[in-house]
Structure formats: C-alpha cells, structure tokens
Image (cartoon, rainbow, N blue to C red):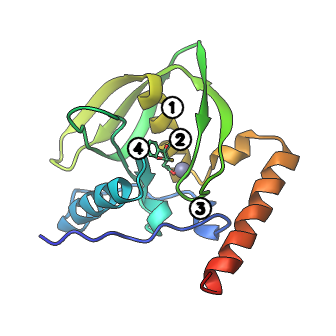
Amino acid sequence: MRLMIRSILIHPDPRLKKPCEAVGPITPEIAALGRDMLETMYDAPGIGLAAPQVGVMKRVIVMDCIKDGTPEPMVLCNPSVIWSSEDQNTYEEGCLSIPDQYAEVKRPAAVKVSWLGLDGKQYERLFSGIWATCVQHEIDHLDGKLFIDYLGPLKRQMITRKMEKLKRELARGY
Ligand code: K1U
Ligand code: ZN
C-alpha cells in the first residue's frame, strides 16, 4: 500500500464552494483516499482535512487534534452532526486552503457526530474543545463552506484578494 501526499487546493477554487456527494460502501479507493488525506494533513501540517481540499468531491474528512502525545488519527465518512450544544466557543481558526490567515469563529462548544468508519461500521461520538471546532470546520468543507464565510464581507474580501495574489505568485513560480 503506497501512501500519496496530495496537493491542497487554495481558495478561491470552485471545488471548495460545492457540496460533496455521500460515500457509498467503503471501497479500496475510499480507504486509500482516507489514508492519503491523513498523510497529507500530517505533512502540511494541520489538525484536519476534508476531501474537497484535495479535489475529491466526496464526504470524507480526517482529523487528529492531539498536539503532544499519542496521535489519534481519525477518518470519518459521511459525518453528520446529530446534536449541538447551546453554549458556544470562539476559536481562532485557520485553513490549509487559506494559508497564513486566521480569524475568530463562534461555533457550538460540543457536538455529537455520527459517521461511517473505514471498517464499514457506523460510529457516534461527542466532541468538545478543539475537536468540536475542527469537526465542524471539516463538515463545513463538505457543504462548500469556508471559515471566512462566517466573517463580514470586508474581511472576507480582503482575505480572498490576498489568496488571489498568492495563487498568481505560485503560478509564476515565486
Ligand atoms: O481544514 C483545514 O483546512 C485544516 C485546518 C483545521 C482547523 C484548524 C483550526 C481550527 C479549525 C480547523 C488546519 O489544520 S489549519 C492548521 C492548524 O490549525 C495547525 C497547524 C499546525 C499545528 C497545529 C495546528
Ligand atoms: Zn479548512
């Protein structure tokens, strides 16, 4: 089994604005996608990654929010929030598709999520802290939503212009 680091799309890209389709049964291709995404996330480095960020329009996300200690890699297919807490948390979010830009986003402090694992089994888990923020950020990606969509239009436009400039520079090989 060969792992592949996939390239991460940079905003603005139409694939980051489209909803993704549900995964059917777990195939070897989906299992390989999940493993490649984990490798790509660790390489970036990041704490999460969603399939559309690597140009695959399927409902698959990966996460590992452990900073120090034993890694806890997770691959979630068809993740769905089935409960959200009333209380909210504000966290300074980043995004691997919007490099070096950070902004505070308010979201439910805890969420219960159901998903299909790569072993074909259905799971449910309560996430809190950074895990709750990360899983909501990643599920948003599957619905074509970015963290900058929570900001005001001026801030969002400023970040988008910076990213357009970055993409022009990258295309010229700077
Ligand atoms: O989805 C993504 O673009 C990944 C993103 C996830 C995320 C970060 C912060 C709040 C919510 C969701 C990232 O991983 S950005 C990079 C990052 O946060 C990080 C990088 C190195 C060490 C620790 C964190
Ligand atoms: Zn992101």
- The amino acid on which the numbered mark 2 sits, given as a three-letter code, is His
Number of the front mark, 1 or 4: 4
Marks 4 and 3, how far apart at CA: 18 Å
Q: Position of residue 83 (x, y in %)?
A: 47, 22
Q: In terms of depth relative to the viewer, which is nearer, 84 or 7?
A: 7
Between the residue at mark 1 and the residue at mark 4, the CA separation in whole angstroms equals 11 Å
Residue ID for mark 3 = 16
* Residue farthest along the top direction in this orientation: 87
Residue 119, horizontal then vertical, whole percent: 15, 47
Name the spot of residue 99 as percent of width and height, x first: 59, 57
Q: Earlier in the sequence, mark 2 or mark 4?
A: 4
Residue type at mark 1: give it: Thr
**Mark on residue 47?**
4
Check if mark 1's residue and mark 4's residue have beta carbons within 8 Å: no
Circle 3 SS class: helix
Would you say the beta carbon of the disc 2 residue lies within 8 angstroms of ligand 1?
A: yes
Residue 137 got which mark? 2
Q: CA distance from mark 3 to mark 1?
A: 19 Å
Q: Tag 4: residue type?
A: Ile
x 18%, y 41%: residue: 121
The residue positioned 75% from the left and 71% from the top of the image is: 165
Return the disc, 2 or 3, that comes first in the chain's sequence.
Answer: 3
Closer to the chain start, of discs 4 and 3, is 3
User: Ligand 1 within 8 A of label 1's CB?
Assistant: yes
Please name the residue shown 33% across and 59% down the image: 37
The amino acid pointed to by label 3 is Leu
